[in-house]
Image (cartoon, rainbow, N blue to C red):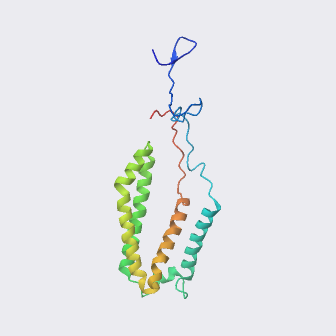
């Protein structure tokens, strides 16, 4: 055996030496795979007050839009009973959003069964993301076309505000809390 450090029993220990670090304990490559990584759901990164304020503003704006609607009645009543809305584009837009949600839930459940992180990104980027994006854009256009007779040009910022509020709220609506996988004995 050659290239190791001698140990008391006559054997050798293999050590990695990095050319970039001169001090002994600063090598970032040593023992990187064997350390346990914190799980994102157990110890989330603390948010700054600016991020919290932004989230609160998106949610408050969406609640304002839903509650006040067109100044005469709330948005739910308008969507259900107003004759000015074009119904077919509204229904097709709702179907597109439902299909998007089903695909996202399916892909999320499928990605939980995969072991490696890079496999999860390959699954999302190749199969689902282009389709989800295209379906979301088509649904946004259908909603804009359906609601244009009521709000006119304000339909675009209204729908964008509702979309952003959904992006803020949906990560907190976890149905099942998944437990982290035990990656203690991984060698990759």
Q: Position of residue 1 (x, y in %)?
A: 45, 14
Question: In the image, residue 144 lies at what x, y percent?
Answer: 41, 78
Q: Residue 86's x, y, as percent?
A: 38, 83
Residue drawn where x is 62% and y is 66% of the image: 53
In the picture provided, is 183 more to the left or to the right than 94?
A: right
Q: Give above or below for 170 relative to 67.
A: above
Residue at horizontal 45 percent and vertical 86 percent from the top: 150
Position above or below: 141 against 23: below
Can you say which quadrant of the picture contains the C terminus? top left
**Residue, x 38% and y 49% (percent of image)?**
122
Name which quarter of the figure residue 130 lies in: bottom left
The count of marks equals 0
Give whichever of 137, 111 is nearer the camera.
137
The one of 163 and 54 positioned closer to us in this rendering: 54
- Viewer-proximal residue, 103 or 80? 103
> Residue at position x 56%, y 11% from top?
9
Q: Residue lying furthest top in this view?
A: 10
Task: Measuring from the top left, give residue 76's x and y in whole percent.
Answer: 51, 79
Left or right of residue 129, residue 62 in this image? right
* Residue farthest along the right direction in this orientation: 49
């Amino acid at each position: 055996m050659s290239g190791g450090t001698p140990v008391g029993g006559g054997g050798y220990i293999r050590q990695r030496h990095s050319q970039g670090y001169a001090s002994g304990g600063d090598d970032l490559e040593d023992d990187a795979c064997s350390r346990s990584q914190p799980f994102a759901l157990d110890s989330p990164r603390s948010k700054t007050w600016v991020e919290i304020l932004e989230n609160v503003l998106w949610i408050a704006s969406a609640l304002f839009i839903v509650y006040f609607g067109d100044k005469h009645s709330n948005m739910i009543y308008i969507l259900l009973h107003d004759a000015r809305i074009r119904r077919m584009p509204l229904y097709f837009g709702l179907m597109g959003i439902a299909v998007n949600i089903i695909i996202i839930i399916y892909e999320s459940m499928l990605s939980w069964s995969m072991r490696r992180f890079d496999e999860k990104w390959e699954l999302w980027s190749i199969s689902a993301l282009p389709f989800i994006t295209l379906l979301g854009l088509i649904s946004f256009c259908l909603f804009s076309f359906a609601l244009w007779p009521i709000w006119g040009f304000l339909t675009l910022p209204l729908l964008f505000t509702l979309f952003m509020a959904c992006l803020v709220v949906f990560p907190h609506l976890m149905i099942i809390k998944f437990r982290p996988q035990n990656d203690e004995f991984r060698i990759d």
